[in-house]
Image (cartoon, rainbow, N blue to C red):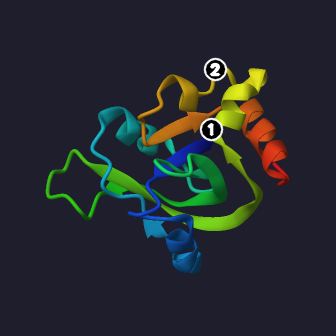
Amino acid sequence: MRYWLFKSEPATWSWEDQQAKGEAGEEWDGVRNYQARNFMREMAVGDRGFFYHSQTEKAVVGIVEVIAEAHPDSTSDDPRWECVDIRAVAPVARAVTLDEIKAEPRLAEMALLRQSRLSVQPVREAEWRIVCEMAGVAP
């Protein structure tokens, strides 16, 4: 299993929106960055991810699971763009803010801090465990 982080502006697609989709989940569509698209191509069903509210909150607010591997993005006629489907697994017990992640020395190399604008990014297993601990959830 691999771990990821999915960033979304809550005004566009929030954790509550994701949860409302239930077991059926939703396409993680609209990504128009090659590196983010390539990360989605690496994902496998069962991989887990953090759902991160960008812009206003700047915090990890939930945990999601990949439920469909990369396929054509339904919001584009361009075959270059692909996406995965994800479903909400659980909210975190406590949101973990960007400032808290920055303050944790063990997370200094996290992609979130090094490639802050990337909407889909990998999370190392050790980072996953640390953020889960900070969030009050089992890894």
Residue at 79% from the left image edge and 39% from the top image edge: 129
CA–CA distance between discs 2 and 1? 13 Å
Say which residue label 2 marks.
109
Q: Which amino acid, mark 1?
A: Leu
Q: Nearer the viewer, residue 59 or 2?
A: 59
In the image, residue 35 above or below residue 45: above
Say which residue label 1 marks.
98
Residue at 55% from the left image edge and 49% from the top image edge: 44
Tag 2, which secondary structure?
Answer: loop
Q: Which amino acid, mark 2?
A: Glu
Q: Nearer the viewer, residue 110 or 72?
A: 110
Left/right placement of residue 106 relative to residue 59 reads right
In the image, residue 60 above or below residue 110: below
Q: Nearer the viewer, residue 26 or 114?
A: 114
Q: Quadrant of residue 72?
A: bottom left
Residue at 80% from the left image edge and 36% from the top image edge: 130
Determine which of the numbered discs, if any, sits on residue 22 in the image: none
